[in-house]
Amino acid sequence: MFRKETVLEDKAFKVLEKIPTRVFASDVTASHYVAGLIAETIRRHNGQGKPTVLGLATGNTPVNVYRELIRLHREEGLDFSRVVTFNLDEYWPMPPDSIQSYYRWMRENFFDHVNVPAANIHIPDGTLPPSEVASFCDIYEERIRAAGGIDIQILGIGRTGHVGFNEPGSSRESRTRLISLDRVTRMDAAADFFGEENVPRQAITMGVGTILAAKRILLLAFGEQKAPIIRKAVEGPITDEVAASFLQEHDNAEVICGPASSANLTRLATPWLLGEIEWTPGYERRAVIWLSLTAGKSILRLDQDDYDHHHLASLVRQAGPVDDLNIRVGRSLWDTLLRQGMAPTGKRMICFSPHPDDDVISMGATLTEMTKCGNEVHVAYMTSGNIAVFDDYARQMLNFWSDLNHIFEFDSNRTLSFVRKVKDFFAAKTPGAVDIREVQQIKEWIRRNEAAAACRSMRIPFRNAHFLDLPFYQTGEVSKRPITDADVKIVTELLRKVRPHWVFLAGEMADPHGTHRLCAEAVLRALRELGPDEKPEIVWLYRGAWQEWDVDMIDMAIPFSKAQLTNKIFGIFKHQSQKDKALFPGPYDDREFWQRAEARNRETAAKYNALGLPDYYAIEAFVRWEGE
């Protein structure tokens, strides 16, 4: 998404890839490609008077495929009346009307919007008693065979490499069955169930053998968190520890990646190991930094032997000599450092924070420094973050408020009625149920006041804290609506009001809940609405709690001291509802947010030092957005 080098498509650079892999410029473009393949197959089969049998997946990965198919149905008349569908999996046990049910998800995100006949829709039944599951699975397999087999099977991929719910250990011959879920899979699903303890321990899934029997397989993978497993599945050996690796045996399988999920493939990460490349400035910088970290030597100490032994002799021939090359790359890194006394002054700046704590977690030290240097700093909290407050913490705050009103005799009757309604709801609430509006408001104000406290710690006046409550988030569920013109309008109006010189927004794609991606979409769309005289001077992208920029991508690095890092951590502590254990910490890291922020900032500083730059205590890093 942010590296400018062309993706190498020559056969020599794909030699390690055992499954044909396409890398697209964006996740949406990739999804539209897949939707186009499906639509073309449906149209061809409709013209031949025969059905199209689709194997379908659920979740964030294929959602844009379904949205594009819905658009094609509504706007271009794509006819689904001959389509037959078989879904990959379903949790067990699972009522079909549950907000976590794949049955419900498919209806809300696809089937309710196209004309697939109800009789043609097949989804594993999560309501079956244990004694009937095995026979149902046999019938499911028979129905697939009776339909003529699956023409196109859509897959996602889990962190363990599972496709469907085929966990590590699933055999090549496995068929539709009840399976126990791996803990990693359950952790990945925890956000949808408001806690890992609420995730079912079993699921009904098509088997690896069932999937491989499809005529064509399209595996989609988006986001940085998928990059390591995509490399294992595509370049690694076939093993039942990575079920997706079995696709290497299929004659018509294809992996569809966005820029982030493909980043670890050798032809993208280190293409110079595979063949001769055109040495652009971006490749030059990346290769020298890679060499320095691989060889364990600072950039200025690298010599000809280091380049020769690590397949970089062609870089020296084109861009050398070695000393000049080292100095040039070393200086480019030095120039990224916004050292003491270099911070701008008198600028208006705005940080768009997807959740009420992303600002201080991601760039708390930078915001404090920019305020200290006399800049007018604003923070726009794009969503309320109210679904991420534990019920027990909300009850604690409710009791405090109730007791305070009772002690000071404020609106006692109204207070009692309100408290009784909320407590009755909590008493009857089932895991994962959507909160009533009153509870959502309590949780919203908890997070709003925590954000205000964090602003004080960063010296940002409360008048510069903007709570946007974008409509896309207001579902009460983990799943969110797409960004609409209503969301963009709110952001655009704020930009026109503040007229910032600098804009900061979350540019990381590893957010497991998708809110960061949607918020970035809203801001970037809003920026396009602005006239030439309204646009900011610079747009900076920061990373959230999950991942940091690779050093070669960093355009601005802001170093800070141990005392400044401590102040940032205390600012994170203001978010007490997220302290100790957040409701949605993400499945990839069980540390608290302050621990992740501290480690990430110190690791970035350590990498700069290893490359030969000053030994700073911590660094916050940013990438300059150059537009699409």
Image: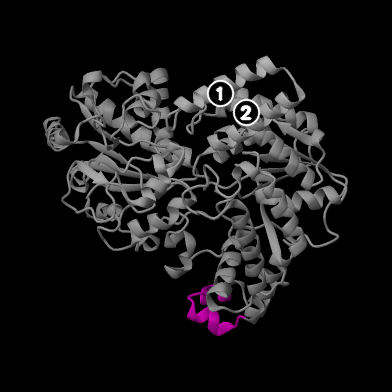
Residue 155 position in % (x across, y down): 32, 42
Cβ atoms at labels 2 and 1 below 8 Å apart:
yes
Identity of the amino acid at label 2? Answer: Ile
Q: Nearer the viewer, mark 2 or mark 1?
A: 1
**Over which residues does the magenta segment extend?**
302-317
Q: Report the disc number at residue 6.
A: none
Say above or below: 14 vs 291: above
Q: Report the disc number at residue 442.
A: 2
SS assignment for the magenta stretch, majority: helix
Q: Residue at x 46, y 51 (%)?
A: 225
Residue 520 position in % (x across, y down): 60, 38
Which quadrant is the C terminus positioned in? top right
The residue beneath circle 1 is 422
The 10 Å Cα crowd at callout 2, few under 14, some 14 to 19, many 20 or more, is some
Residue furthest toward the top? 413
Identity of the amino acid at label 1? Answer: Val
